[in-house]
Image (cartoon, rainbow, N blue to C red):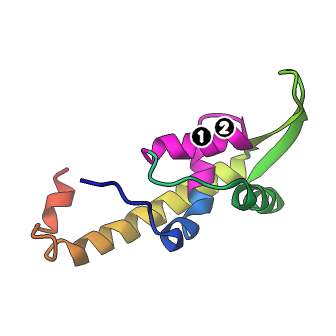
Amino acid sequence: MVKEKTSGDMVRGNLDLMVLSALADGPKYGYLIQNALSKASGGTFTVQAGTLYPLLHRLEAEGWVRSRWDDSTGRKRKWYRLTPRGRKQLVHQAQQWREYADCIWRILAPVLGQSPDAMESS
């Protein structure tokens, strides 16, 4: 089976959730966030810097992430970390996403020849 790139519309609608999730296990700078998302998606999608950095600035304005400059690695990098408010937002968005995904699954399961209950047993 050939892996297709994920639709840009589907990714765009979930970028906040994905970036917050990438920061859940600790601080990262932009390139590490991009790599974490690419790896977690199995290479299905990548987030370009031109999309990521404005998003990070917006998440910081929302109070969901904080940033700090660091040059201890020999190169000046801006590191981002979740705030307690950001972690709460991550959990909230993850719960909303799960409810939505469950709903879509129930709608699509018959089309895919599966029982909607099959997801609940997995």
Q: Residues within 10 Å of mark 2 (few under 14, many from 20)?
A: some
Q: Which residues are magenta?
A: 18-42
Residue underneath mark 1:
35
Q: Does residue 44 appear anywhere in the picture?
A: yes
x 71%, y 56%: residue: 52
- Name the amino acid, label 2: Leu
Residue that numbered label 2 is attached to: 32
Q: Please identify the dominant SS of the magenta region.
A: helix
* Callout 1–callout 2 Cβ contact below 8 Å: yes
Circle 2: element type: helix
Q: Is residue 116 above or below residue 20?
A: below
Q: Residue visible at 49% across and 58% down?
A: 94
- The residue drawn where x is 81% and y is 58% is 57
Residue 65 pos. (x, y %): 75, 50
Q: Amino acid at mark 1?
A: Asn
Looking at the image, residue 120 lies above or below residue 101: above
Q: Report helix, strand or loop for mark 1.
A: helix
